[in-house]
Image (cartoon, rainbow, N blue to C red):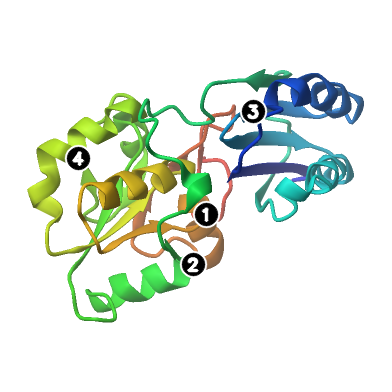
């Protein structure tokens, strides 16, 4: 019976007190019996948690009580067991490492594309202005191998910090097209979209909520395979269930 609630959430927002938030959050999460990981940095928060539904939502409510995190959005899925072995809260330099300090999503994000809009564009083969649409997978190569969008561009990244260099090498491939960057939950494609705009590409979108939100809202049309997740479930199918 799927009675364990799994959530993933992130937000780019200035958190100059990130280090001081670590210990109270860890104590609260452990008191609620939760397991997973929370990353804190000056640029924001990124979290993956699992546990009893009331406990998960209690921690979310505590986070949202901070005005800076009031609109923190979480993607949900369910499992019959907790897919994490322990509860960790870490203070990091970045909540998703890119090593590109000029990219500050909290100062302004690239346009976000809703899942149903991407599905419609892929159904019709172009965006609403008639431009060709390409999907760009910003995940690591081993994640892409589990599953991705049909015809997605895959630069065989070993780690996300390689993305800016890969973009410079393949920039011409994206010229004149509407580019939709995507990743598991939205955090990597948010930074990737800003790097592409910085490089001079003006028709760039990020898939809102990443693959997980797309699967939740569309059932996975135009997506083949499964979506790798960084926990013991390993990968989720179009119904957000662990792969058989």
Q: What element carries label 1?
A: loop
To which residue does mark 2 refer?
218
Mark 3 / mark 1, whichever is N-terminal: 3
Q: Which mark is residue 40?
A: 3
Q: Residue shown at 40%/43% (left/top)?
A: 191
Mark 3 / mark 4, whichever is N-terminal: 3
Q: How far apart are marks 4 and 2 (CA)?
A: 29 Å
Q: What element carries label 2?
A: helix
Residues marked 4 and 1 touching at CB (< 8 Å): no
Q: Distance between the residues labelled 1 and 2?
A: 12 Å
To which residue does mark 1 refer?
209
Q: Does the rendering let one see residue 186?
A: no
Question: Which of the pair 214/201 is nearer the observer?
Answer: 201
Q: Distance between the residues labelled 4 and 1?
A: 22 Å
Q: Does the rendering let one see residue 231?
A: yes
> Where the N terminus falls, by quadrant?
top right
Q: What element carries label 4?
A: helix
Q: Which of marks 3 and 1 is in front?
A: 3
Q: Residue shown at 36%/37% (left/top)?
A: 139
Q: What element carries label 3?
A: strand
In the rendered structure, the answer to whether residue 168 lies left or right of residue 29 reads left
In the rendered structure, the answer to whether residue 96 lies left or right of residue 46 reads left
Q: Distance between the residues labelled 3 and 4?
A: 27 Å
């Amino acid at each position: 019976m799927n009675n364990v609630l799994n959530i993933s959430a992130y937000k780019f927002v200035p958190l100059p007190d990130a280090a001081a938030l670590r210990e109270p959050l860890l104590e609260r999460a452990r008191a609620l019996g939760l397991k997973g990981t929370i990353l804190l940095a000056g640029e924001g928060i990124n979290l993956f948690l699992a546990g009893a539904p009331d406990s998960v939502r209690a921690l979310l409510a505590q986070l949202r009580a901070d005005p800076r995190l009031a609109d923190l959005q979480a993607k949900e899925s369910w499992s019959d067991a907790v897919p994490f072995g322990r509860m960790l809260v870490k203070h990091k330099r970045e909540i998703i490492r890119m090593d590109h300090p000029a990219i500050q999503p909290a100062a302004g994000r690239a346009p976000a594309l809703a899942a149903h809009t991407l599905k419609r564009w892929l159904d019709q083969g172009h965006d609403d202005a008639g431009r060709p649409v390409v999907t760009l997978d910003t995940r690591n190569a081993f994640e892409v191998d589990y599953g991705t969008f049909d015809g997605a561009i895959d630069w065989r990244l070993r780690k996300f910090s390689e993305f800016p260099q890969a973009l410079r090498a393949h920039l011409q491939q994206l010229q004149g097209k509407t580019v939709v960057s995507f990743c598991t939950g939205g955090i990597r494609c948010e930074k990737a979209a800003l790097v592409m705009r910085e490089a001079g590409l003006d028709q760039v979108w990020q898939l809102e909520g990443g693959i997980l939100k797309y699967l939740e809202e569309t059932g996975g049309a135009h997506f083949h395979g499964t979506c790798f997740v960084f926990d013991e479930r390993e990968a989720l199918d179009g119904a957000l269930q662990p792969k058989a």
